[in-house]
Amino acid sequence: MTTVASMKDVAAKVLAGERITPEDGLYLLKEAPLLDLGSLAQEVRYRHNPDPIVTFVIDTNLNYTNICDAFCTFCAFYRTEKDSDAYTYTVEQVMEMVGQASAKGVTTVLLQGGLNSKLPMEYYEELVRETKRLYPHVLPHYFSAPEIQKMSQVSEMPVSEVLRRLKEAGQETLPGGGSEVLSNRVKRRLSRLWPKGRAEDWEEVHREAHRLGYRTTATMMYGHLEQPEDVIEHLERTRFLQDEALVAGMEGFTAFVPWSYKRGNTPLAKRVKEESGPNPYLRMIAISRIYLDNIQHIQASWFSEGKKTGEVALSFGGDDFGGTLFDENVMQEAGFYNRTSTEETQSMIRDAGFTPAQRTTKYEILRVFE
Ligand code: SF4
């Protein structure tokens, strides 16, 4: 793919409401002046979300097991069954943690775990059902695509049936983790178990979820072995999936959430010498906003790139500030620690020049803090 576009041409196209091509995207990623790109993205942000409101959700990240047999090279979280600090919590133990989160005002619990071959389908259904029964105001935002694929393998059921059963138990949304970069060139290089975990596997889960009426998020973890062409392929695949959902009369993705790879304690660090910094993040937020013309929300988090960069990203196309993430553990295992409170989240949004609003997992506004 060669770039033949210019900022003027791409801006004219975007301002006329036209869709940009992979070549345009590659130009924006590799050559466009950063501030011009940011202003253009911000124009598009106001087209999708006209009010100067930035949303956030009061949420937490919990884990039910760290036992995993996927051995992803970018992961510092997983353990084998033999490790002394390996764990799998019972449904009761997880409910205790959900209860503690609920007492802090959490409305969304993001629950994820390793790919644990010992856990039956009933365990996952019970996690959802019990959450709904005990904490009806907490939305179970559980299980990313690789976990759904694992359930499908272990229980020998198609992905669609796994998702149908979880839906019947009360689940309505699915987090977007596990996509990394949706390019099999990258996935082949990242995985020790290739061809497991292909881009198409992640897509299959989200396509089926959208068909069943779930809202899901799309994510990207960049800053490791990918080339600019791979990032464009990821955006192209995401935009295509969302087109499919919308054409079928479904709502599909709520938001797109990019973040950068963190090296600490991961085997991949031997091959990736430096972490991606604030400028690539701002560029990624802006390009996501422009490229993904069919996704309403772009999440610019305070979490993964630091609070100041997160605030700046709200002027580069982001209209959402993610969650409060009270108990994040996965990035913490990679030596990356960052915490906030509901009050600080609001004050960061105000500092950035916007009005904070609390939302649900489905991006419905609960309260605007004028
Ligand atoms: S990223 Fe997830 S699937 Fe991969 S090794 Fe870590 S826990 Fe397992």
Image: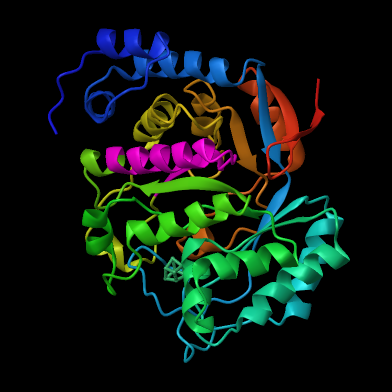
Q: Is residue 345 magenta?
A: no
Q: Please give the name of the residue rendered at 47% of the width and 92% of the height, measured from the top-left corner.
A: 82
Q: Is residue 210 above or below residue 334?
A: above
Residue 230: x percent and y percent? Answer: 25, 44
Residue 223: x percent and y percent? Answer: 32, 46
Q: Which residues are magenta?
A: 232-260
Which image quadrant shows ligand 1? bottom left
Q: Is residue 46 above or below residue 185?
A: above
Residue 124: x percent and y percent? Answer: 65, 74
> Residue 12's quadrant in the figure?
top left
Q: Is residue 10 left or right of residue 204?
A: left
Q: Is residue 257 magenta?
A: yes
Query: Residue 306, can we see it?
Result: no
Residue extending farthest front: 248
Q: Please give the name of the residue rendered at 85% of the width and 61% of the height, measured from the top-left corner.
A: 135
Q: Please give the name of the residue rendered at 49% of the width and 13% of the height, measured from the top-left corner.
A: 43
